[in-house]
Image (cartoon, rainbow, N blue to C red):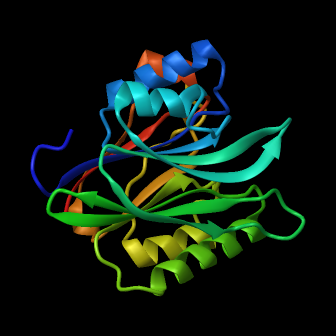
Amino acid sequence: MTSAPGDVRLATWNIHGGHHRHDIARIVAVLREMAADVVALQEVMPLGIEEGLLQAARDQLGMHVVTGRTFTRRNVDYGNALLSRFAVRRSAPIDLTVERCEPRNAIDAQIVLPGHELRVVATHLGLRPGERREQVRRILRALDHTPLGPAVVMGDLNEWYLWGRPLRWLHRRFAAMRTPATFPAFRPVLKLDRIWGHPASALVRLATHRTALARSASDHLPLVADFRF
């Protein structure tokens, strides 16, 4: 997508654990359709880059791959992944696990775009309201530790309360954005997936990727944002 030094397309997509050969082919095809420079994926299994979807993203799409394991299921690592057409200068996990809840994390990465760097925080938040509040607090604290230049926070926030505090806190930090519904894919009514950018004025376009292939590949639609930083 990138056509000028400041242009970048980002996407977030919960792929709902697609790991069979047919699932991988469809997901790779949707990634080609979207033509995003940076993609946050949730519910990825396996997370190894020598097999499955992430190997295909690396070898077929030429993407750099960063993984964020949340737990191991049946001896297979499961969690989040960040794909980037550009080099990743550094990456680190943000621990978002709340006691007595499913393990969660965020990937905090610095991506080297032409002419500047972009900080990307990619995550998948929990199912309980109190859990999500604590997780957003931790993300915002991580962002507060360094001067905030061009940055994006994106992922499946699992936040269906439009008036909920996690959304209000993120809107306050990044400015509210009109986000389309992404779930369920065939008739979206819930805005579970989100992308915020800093500065907010850099946002050019925010929309779901609503092709027949995308609707068949997962129960979430991908959310795509074009920025001009």
Q: Nearer the viewer, residue 200 or 152?
A: 152
* Left/right of residue 21 with respect to residue 31 in the rendered view: right
Q: Is residue 165 above or below residue 108?
A: below
Quadrant housing residue 51: top right
Where 141 falls versus 180 (above or below)? below
Q: Position of residue 168 (x, y in %)?
A: 53, 73
Residue furthest top in the image: 22
Nearest the camera: 108 or 194?
Answer: 108
Residue name at image x 69 percent, y 66 percent: 132
Task: Say left or right for 101 vs 227.
Answer: right
**The C terminus sits in image quarter:** bottom left
**Could you say which quadrant of the image residue 164 lies in?**
bottom right
Q: Residue at x 32, y 39 (%)?
A: 36
Q: As displayed, is residue 192 above or below residue 90?
A: above
222 lies left or right of 127: left
Identify the residue shown where x is 11% and y is 43%.
Answer: 3
Residue 32 place in picture, x, y as percent: 35, 25
Image quarter where the N terminus lies is top left
Residue 14 visible to the viewer: yes
Q: Of residues 53 and 172, which is closer to you in this image?
A: 53
Q: Position of residue 52 (x, y in %)?
A: 59, 26
Residue extending furthest toward the left = 4
Query: Of all residues shown, which one is farthest toward the front?
Result: 50
